[in-house]
Image (spheres, helix red, strand yellow):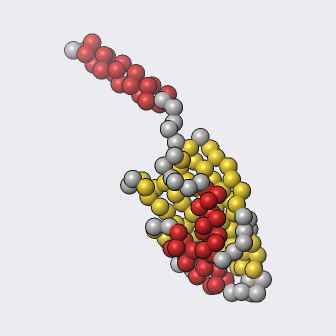
C-alpha cells in the first residue's frame, strides 16, 4: 500500500513538472495611448466620451467607481476574456481634463493587436492620440 501511495505521489509530481514546463501558447500584447489634455471641457465630458468609446468598441463596459472617470471594457472570445481597454479621465484645474488610453490583448486569441484596439477606442472617443506597443510572453 505504501508503494502505491509513493507511486501516485511521484506520478502527480511528474505530471506537475510536465505541465509547468510546457511552453506558453499565448502572449500579452499591450499598447499605451498618448495622454491628451483638454483645457476647456468639463470632466464629465471626458467620462461620457470614455463610456461612449468603450461601449462602441467593447462587449462589456464598467466604470471603476461611480464618478471616478476610470472606465474599462472587456471582450471575451471563446468564453474567456481576451481583450481589455482602459480609458482614464483626470480633472485638470477648475475646467479641463487629461485622458489616457491603455489596451491589452491576448494573442493569438484576439484578432486585433493592442495598438489596433487602442486606435479604435481613441477614434470612438474622438481624439487624435496614438498608441505605443509592447508585448510580454
Q: Nearer the viewer, residue 67 or 3?
A: 67
Left of 66 or right of it: where is 32?
A: right
Residue 1 visible to the viewer = yes
- Find residue 133 and report its horizontal and vertical position in percent: 68, 53
Judged left or right of residue 108, residue 5 is: left
Residue furthest toward the left? 1
Percent coordinates x, y for residue 28 in the rendering: 57, 48
| Among the 4 quarters of the image, the one containing residue 6 | top left
Quadrant (top left/top right/bottom left/bottom right) for the N terminus? top left
Residue 69, x across and y down, in percent: 60, 76
Residue placed at 76% from the left, 76% from the top? 37
Give coordinates of residue 114: x percent, y percent.
Answer: 61, 56
Residue in the image at 64% along x and 46% along y: 135
Q: Residue at x 53, y 50 (%)?
A: 106
Along the viewing direction, whichever of 26 and 10 lies nearer the viewer: 26
Residue shown at the point (72%, 79%) measured from the top left: 97
Amino acid at each position: 500500500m505504501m508503494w502505491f501511495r509513493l507511486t501516485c505521489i511521484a506520478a502527480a509530481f511528474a505530471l506537475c513538472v510536465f505541465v509547468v514546463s510546457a511552453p506558453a501558447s499565448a502572449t500579452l500584447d499591450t499598447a499605451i495611448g498618448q495622454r491628451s489634455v483638454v483645457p476647456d471641457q468639463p470632466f464629465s465630458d471626458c467620462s461620457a466620451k470614455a463610456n461612449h468609446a468603450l461601449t462602441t468598441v467593447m462587449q462589456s463596459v464598467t466604470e471603476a467607481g461611480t464618478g471616478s472617470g476610470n472606465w474599462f471594457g472587456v471582450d471575451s472570445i471563446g468564453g474567456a476574456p481576451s481583450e481589455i481597454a482602459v480609458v482614464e479621465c483626470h480633472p485638470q484645474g477648475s475646467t479641463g481634463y487629461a485622458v489616457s488610453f491603455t489596451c491589452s490583448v491576448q494573442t493569438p486569441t484576439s484578432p486585433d493587436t493592442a495598438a489596433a484596439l487602442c486606435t479604435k477606442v481613441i477614434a470612438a472617443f474622438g481624439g487624435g492620440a496614438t498608441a505605443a506597443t509592447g508585448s510580454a510572453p
